Image (cartoon, rainbow, N blue to C red):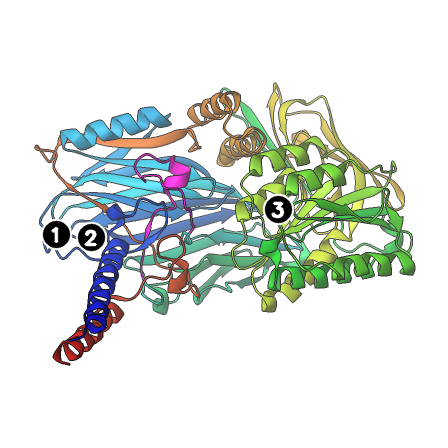
């Protein structure tokens, strides 16, 4: 064989070795020092059950505007060796998690709330001592982590989580969402998953392949007690069966074909007859603290002469990540919004990437000429550069404005930034001058940023993930933001000693969004709460008599919901600074609430695994429905299927043999 032929053979052998090594690296998470997700691969040890989570069940009880949820996770070791299991799972960003119990060895144990590091130390000690234990942590605002220690062979551990959530109707529709899967996220950080911070470590997670069914079953049952006649119940995400208990109550359960429905969010929507929504005052008279919730719903349909003067500040992301579908959709949305303004309206446009461009030093009247000028500016942007959202917000929110004019800032972005807390602080600092609505566009929107901006701006988050969805979402968005019915809103009390009220600044009221106010009170449940504002026809006032409000022990969730609201505001404002950490930790410990700095820990105080040795396993996530394998594998690289690797190896070997015979 000639020298060149030998060189080619050597090159092919080296390539073969690299291919095998690459596949081995992709299959073995321990060999990958980045924090990227990876595909789950069985280790071939028949003594180890690598899939200990067998079942997730959610029992949802909706009474009025409060959803009470109990989530049961069943872990079972069907192998021959003790296991320690870790599982990442999603949660609603609005969930107030206030309880956990475990059932193991015939004993039911209520978890205790602890400071996060203390909870981790207690769990590690129990794990080492051979005791069964469970640890629940918050890794991100909408991602939790469950760790279970010392699951013995043929053992079953049942973990129950208890949380509450407030349901605020939009456009007369109540929506309950139960997230089921954490989608893949990427990080090129060359940091060990053992030393990374929990909110970063969650990125490194195993996934099943595209189209592969979840390894655990999923079921959910929802009971709705609306208190008013229900017009319709819809579940656009799953096949369900609806049983009507009476005119105002229904039971909804998954169809028998949905046992593997845990690869997409469960979404349940319902409307009340006559387009009604729950409004009024709820009270919880506690032993140490008493809580109230006020929900005020403005009229649903607003005549044009009832709409006060309006000003819109459009803040449009034209950075590189918006190029293509996101920017095309954003342009169409902007054409629709700006083109639909009244001549009496005023508006301005801020385009931002690495820098920002302002349409005008002060807002312009929405004349045909000014509208054409704005659309021309937007249409000539192609997308490119960084994403300096913070600087763009500073510029937009600092624009001069007129008193008595309803100002709304509208941010359109995919949200691919990391400085979320800084953005939230800027929005809250300017909340008295304008409302803010966030519109997320793209197939992988940063929902933490979009929802956080809307929460900080007392607006509503809107997300369009694909072109087909964008039209309907944009239409709803346009209808929503163009209907302010009250500006300069004030909430005042007389004879009712309220304090610690959330939110601290009251936004404008829109036709399809209620005003929600949480707070505490001292003394007797007496006096009045007065809501004032300026509408298109002049001053508006609505008075609530506190003594007429519903006061009940069944409203005890109000305390958790108030604390969750304050935790969200503090977290959005302060990020990870020490003052915020102390405040959030105190709230978590006081109200027994899961937070970024407090965790639930439950330990079965019986040594069940004397030598403490157990196999550590990480429960894989199914890929979200519609997501391909290209979303997982190293730092965004596609990892070949094992079958493809084998075929490639055989082909290379045959080619090498042929060359060697020449």
Where does the magenta region start and end? 185-208
Q: Which of marks 1 and 2 is nearer the N terminus?
A: 2
Question: Residue 514 falls in which quadrant of the image?
Answer: top right
Question: Residue 545 falls in which quadrant of the image?
Answer: top right
Picture coordinates of residue 405, whole percent (x, y)? 85, 41
Q: Quadrant of the N terminus?
A: bottom left
Secondary structure of the residue carrying numbered label 1: loop
187 falls in the magenta region? yes
Tags 1 and 2 touching, CB below 8 Å: no
Q: Can residue 629 be seen in this view?
A: yes
Q: Mark 1 to mark 2: distance in Å?
A: 8 Å
The image's mark for residue 79 is: 1
The image's mark for residue 387 is: 3
Secondary structure of the residue carrying numbered label 2: loop
- What secondary structure do most residues of the magenta stretch adopt? loop
Circle 1 residues within 10 Å: few <14, some 14–19, many ≥20: some
Q: In which quarter of the image is the C terminus?
A: bottom left
Circle 2 residues within 10 Å: few <14, some 14–19, many ≥20: many
661 falls in the magenta region? no
Outermost front residue: 3
Picture coordinates of residue 258, whole percent (x, y)? 37, 66
Q: Earlier in the sequence, mark 3 or mark 1?
A: 1
């Amino acid at each position: 064989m000639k020298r060149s032929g030998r060189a080619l053979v050597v090159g092919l052998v080296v390539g073969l070795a690299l291919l095998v090594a690459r596949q081995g690296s992709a299959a073995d998470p321990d060999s990958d020092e980045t924090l990227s997700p990876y595909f789950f691969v069985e280790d071939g040890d028949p003594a180890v059950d690598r899939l200990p989570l067998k079942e997730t069940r959610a029992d949802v009880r909706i009474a009025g505007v409060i959803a009470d949820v109990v989530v049961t996770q069943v872990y079972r070791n069907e192998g021959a060796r003790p296991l320690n299991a870790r599982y990442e799972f999603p949660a609603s960003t609005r969930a107030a998690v206030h309880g956990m119990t475990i059932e193991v060895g015939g004993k039911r144990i209520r978890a205790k709330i602890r400071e996060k590091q203390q909870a981790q130390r207690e769990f590690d000690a129990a794990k080492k001592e051979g005791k069964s234990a469970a640890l629940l942590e918050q890794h991100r605002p909408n991602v939790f982590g469950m760790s279970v220690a010392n699951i013995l062979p043929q053992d079953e551990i049942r973990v129950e989580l208890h949380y509450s959530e407030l349901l605020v109707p939009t456009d007369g529709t109540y929506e309950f969402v139960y997230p089921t899967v954490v989608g893949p996220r990427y990080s090129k950080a060359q940091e060990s998953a053992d030393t990374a911070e929990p909110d970063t470590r969650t990125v490194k997670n195993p996934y099943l392949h595209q189209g592969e069914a979840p390894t655990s079953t999923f079921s959910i049952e929802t009971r709705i007690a609306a208190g008013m006649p229900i017009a319709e119940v819809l579940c656009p995400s799953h096949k369900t069966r609806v049983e009507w208990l009476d005119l105002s109550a229904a039971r909804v359960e998954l169809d028998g074909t949905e046992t593997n429905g845990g690869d997409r969010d469960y979404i349940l929507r319902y409307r009340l007859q006559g387009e009604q929504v729950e409004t009024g005052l709820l009270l919880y008279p506690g032993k140490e603290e008493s809580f109230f919730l006020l929900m005020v719903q403005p009229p649903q349909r607003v005549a044009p002469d009832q709409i006060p003067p309006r000003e819109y500040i459009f803040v449009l992301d034209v950075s590189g990540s918006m190029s293509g579908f996101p920017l095309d959709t954003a342009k169409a949305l902007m054409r629709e919004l700006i083109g639909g303004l009244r001549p009496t309206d005023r508006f301005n446009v801020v385009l931002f990437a690495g820098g920002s461009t302002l349409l005008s030093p002060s807002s312009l009247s929405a004349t045909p000429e000014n509208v054409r000028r704005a659309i021309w500016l937007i249409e000539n942007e192609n997308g490119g550069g960084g994403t300096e959202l913070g600087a763009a917000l500073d510029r937009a929110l600092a624009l001069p404005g007129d008193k008595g004019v309803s100002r709304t800032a509208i941010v359109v972005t995919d949200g691919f930034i990391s400085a979320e807390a800084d953005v939230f602080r800027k929005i809250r600092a300017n909340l008295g001058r304008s409302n803010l609505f966030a519109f997320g566009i793209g197939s992988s929107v940063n929902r933490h940023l979009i929802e956080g901006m809307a929460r900080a701006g007392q607006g509503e988050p809107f997300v369009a993930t694909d072109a087909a969805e964008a039209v309907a979402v944009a239409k709803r968005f346009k209808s929503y933001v163009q209907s302010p019915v009250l500006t300069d809103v004030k909430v005042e009390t007389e004879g009712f000693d309220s304090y610690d009220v959330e939110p601290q600044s009251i936004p404008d009221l829109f036709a399809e969004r209620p005003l929600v106010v949480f707070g505490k009170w001292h003394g007797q449940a007496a006096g009045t709460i007065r809501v004032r504002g300026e509408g298109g026809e002049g001053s508006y006032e609505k008075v609530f008599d506190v003594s007429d409000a519903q006061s009940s022990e069944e409203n005890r969730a109000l305390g958790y919901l108030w604390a969750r609201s304050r935790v969200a505001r503090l977290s959005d404002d302060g990020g990870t600074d020490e003052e915020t950490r102390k405040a959030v930790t105190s709230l978590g410990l006081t109200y027994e609430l899961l937070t970024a700095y407090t965790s639930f820990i439950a330990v079965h105080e019986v040594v069940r695994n004397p030598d403490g040795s157990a196999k550590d396993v990480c429960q894989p996530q199914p890929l979200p429905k519609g997501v391909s394998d290209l979303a997982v594998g190293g730092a965004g690289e596609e990892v070949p299927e094992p079958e493809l690797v084998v075929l490639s190896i055989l082909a290379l070997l045959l080619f090498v043999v042929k060359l060697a015979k020449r």
